[in-house]
Amino acid sequence: MRTAICPGSFDPITLGHLNIIRRTARIFDEVVVLVMFNASKTSPMFTIDERVEQIGRVVAHLSNVTVESYGGLLAEYARRFEHPVIVKGLRASTDFENEFQMAQINKSINPALETMFLTSSEKYTFLSSSMVRELASYGADLSTFVPREVIGDIQKKAKRGK
Ligand code: PNS
């Protein structure tokens, strides 16, 4: 049984994330979407538990996908798998440097760990959670950016933040 880990901060999950999760679920037997803390992203919109619950709703129809959170290092979490594989999406060259660095550091902590990248779908190369948060703060239509299951949550949170 080959399991892939799709880690991220998912604050909130976007259609770009969902595209990577779906494609990973077609390649691997099982996928764990792992909600994690990103030290460079302060002032989150949603708590980790809220994000786990939201993603659970979004991937409910994908039978080989589960959602978890972990507060430690990704490389440590991955030790529970015999052949751990991380799958991440690459949007553009701007993602590459940071992702390459994380993959190298993770491997130095856990040499069994492999990181694979899927190129993001053309439709979503511009899309990020931070852009969604900004659009939400202006009351913009989010339907082409995030799964419909989370639109209401984002709108509510954006309104409360004003
Ligand atoms: O969606 P993001 O914010 O680009 O995901 C980054 C994330 C959360 C995967 C990364 O920050 C991470 O792995 N955090 C967990 C802590 C950790 O292992 N840090 C070392 C990575 S170099």
Image (spheres, rainbow, N blue to C red):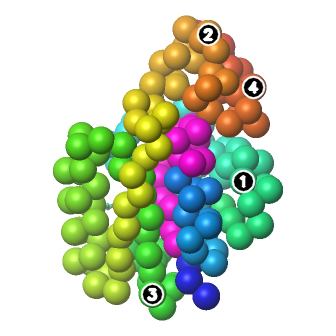
Helix, strand or loop status at disc 2: loop
Q: Residues within 10 Å of mark 1 (few under 14, many from 20)?
A: some
Name of the residue lying farthest toward the bottom: 82
**Crowding at label 2, few (<14), some or many (≥20) Cα neighbours within 10 Å?**
few
Say if 147 sits above or below 73 in the image.
above
Which mark lies nearer to you, 3 or 4? 3
Circle 3 sits on which residue? 83
Helix, strand or loop at mark 4 = helix
Residue 158 visible in image: no
Q: Amino acid at mark 1?
A: Val
Sequence-first disc among 2 and 3: 3
Residue kind at label 2, given as amino acid type: Gly
Amino acid type indicated by mark 4: Gly
Mark 4 touches mark 2? (CB < 8 Å): no
Return the disc, 2 or 1, that comes first in the chain's sequence.
1
Residue that label 4 marks? 152
Question: Which is nearer the eye, 86 or 78?
Answer: 86
x, y percent for residue 136: 58, 17
The amino acid on which the numbered mark 3 sits, given as a three-letter code, is: His
